[in-house]
Image (cartoon, rainbow, N blue to C red):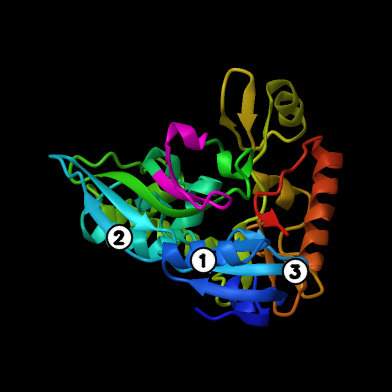
């Protein structure tokens, strides 16, 4: 283990924001992580850097969780439990599961980031959320340095939410996640229109077919972080009261929606942002992506503050025009 001082985090966040860490260290074992936590009072845990916007230098010890390894256990006739370490690349892990014919994660292909951060955000796409497959996870208590196990229920999952974004925020370092996946009789979901279109010539799609369809859709809409800095979806899709939705429906008959309950409706944030005129709009070195208005991008040398200013500008416009408070999905530091 080696500490680095005044270390650039540009290559450690998918936005490609060039901020400095006062101290930086990468850990590959749980024991190393414990040692670093003992040696430093103020730490900033960093995974794949995919769900964050850095707006300032980090005046703390940045600990890169580079824990790797995958273990297969508890296999039954139709299911298997797979435990993946926090530092495993999420997309590569999904592809590995598909290669083993383990079903359940295929709709979550090509989502950036690492395994350890997927429960925090309860990542989701195309009809699936990661909570649907997680049975438990292990997390290191930063104060006691003891490993605690959280069941699915104890994670308190919600829409792009979990206990680790609320009452347990900053208290734990997730070190591994266990998923329950299918080995046959896969419960696949291809109901989304875009997936159906991609699979229209395949009558009985395999896990790989569904994954390839998701990858093709995401590639057609979303910029590659290695080419254009971004953090994927920047805002949550708002859930609004049916009364407000009906009012908006009268003004905008084409507004898309998804029923949540008898009184609540989910509206795509991307549609709202595009309708408000932000899609493809550029503000200096930052802007809104031309193919997906939900994605804010760094075209090269934007600062985190510049990206955040665009986000706030969008929030103000959506609130004024649609009476909807738009909530930021990524973590802003």
Q: Is residue 150 magenta?
A: yes
Q: What are the residue bounds of the magenta stretch? A: 137-156
| Crowding at mark 1 (Cα within 10 Å: few <14, some 14-19, many 20+) | few
Quarter occupied by the C terminus: bottom right
In the foreground, 272 or 163: 163
Q: Residue at x 71, y 64 (%)?
A: 280
253 lies left or right of 211: right
| Residue at the disc numbered 2 | 70
- The image quadrant of residue 247 is top right
In three-dimensional space, the C-alpha distance between marks 1 and 3, rounded to whole angstroms, equals: 20 Å
Instruction: Identify whether 115 is placed above or below 203.
Output: below
Q: Earlier in the sequence, mark 1 or mark 2?
A: 1
178 lies left or right of 317: left
Instruction: Identify whether 107 is placed above or below 248.
Output: below
Kindly indicate whether the residue at mark 3 contacts the one at mark 2 (C-beta within 8 angstroms).
no
Residue 192 x %, y %? 44, 43
Residue 131 x %, y %? 44, 40
Identify the element where label 1 is drawn.
Answer: helix
| Crowding at mark 3 (Cα within 10 Å: few <14, some 14-19, many 20+) | some
Q: Residue at x 58, y 73 (%)?
A: 12
Q: Farthest residue toward the top?
A: 262
| Residue at the disc numbered 1 | 35
172 lies left or right of 166: left
In three-dimensional space, the C-alpha distance between marks 2 and 3, rounded to whole angstroms, equals: 33 Å
Q: Nearer the viewer, mark 1 or mark 3?
A: 1
In the foreground, 239 or 179: 179
Q: Nearer the viewer, mark 1 or mark 2?
A: 1
Q: Nearer the viewer, mark 2 or mark 3?
A: 3
In the foreground, 208 or 22: 22
């Amino acid at each position: 283990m080696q500490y680095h001082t005044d270390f650039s985090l540009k290559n450690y966040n998918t936005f490609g924001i060039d901020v400095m860490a006062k101290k930086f260290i990468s850990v590959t074992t749980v024991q190393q992580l414990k040692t670093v936590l003992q040696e430093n009072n103020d730490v900033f845990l960093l995974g794949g850097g995919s769900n964050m916007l850095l707006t300032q230098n980090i005046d703390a010890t940045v600990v890169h969780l580079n824990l790797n390894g995958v273990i297969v256990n508890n296999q039954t006739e139709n299911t298997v439990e797979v435990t993946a370490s926090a530092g495993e690349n999420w997309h590569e892990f999904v592809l590995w599961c598909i290669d083993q014919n383990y079903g359940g994660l295929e709709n979550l292909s090509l989502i950036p980031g690492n395994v350890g951060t997927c429960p925090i955000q309860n990542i989701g796409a195309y009809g699936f959320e990661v909570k649907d497959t997680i049975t438990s996870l292990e997390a290191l208590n930063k104060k006691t340095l003891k490993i605690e196990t959280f069941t699915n229920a104890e994670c308190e999952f919600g829409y792009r939410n979990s206990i680790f974004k609320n009452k347990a925020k900053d208290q734990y370092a997730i070190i591994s996640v266990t998923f329950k996946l299918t080995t046959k009789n896969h419960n696949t979901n291809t109901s989304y229109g875009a997936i159906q279109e991609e699979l229209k010539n395949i009558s009985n799609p395999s896990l790989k077919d569904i994954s390839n369809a998701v990858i093709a859709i995401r590639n057609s809409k979303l910029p590659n972080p290695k080419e254009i800095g971004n953090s994927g979806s920047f805002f949550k899709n708002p859930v609004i009261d049916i009364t407000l939705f009906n009012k908006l429906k009268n003004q905008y008959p084409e507004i898309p929606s998804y029923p949540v309950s008898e009184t609540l409706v989910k509206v795509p944030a991307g549609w709202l942002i595009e309708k408000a005129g932000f899609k493809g709009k550029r503000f200096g070195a930052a802007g809104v992506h031309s193919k997906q208005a939900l994605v804010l991008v760094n075209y090269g040398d934007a600062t985190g503050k510049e990206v955040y200013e665009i986000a706030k500008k969008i929030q103000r416009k959506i609130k004024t025009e649609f009476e909807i408070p738009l909530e930021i999905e990524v973590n802003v530091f």
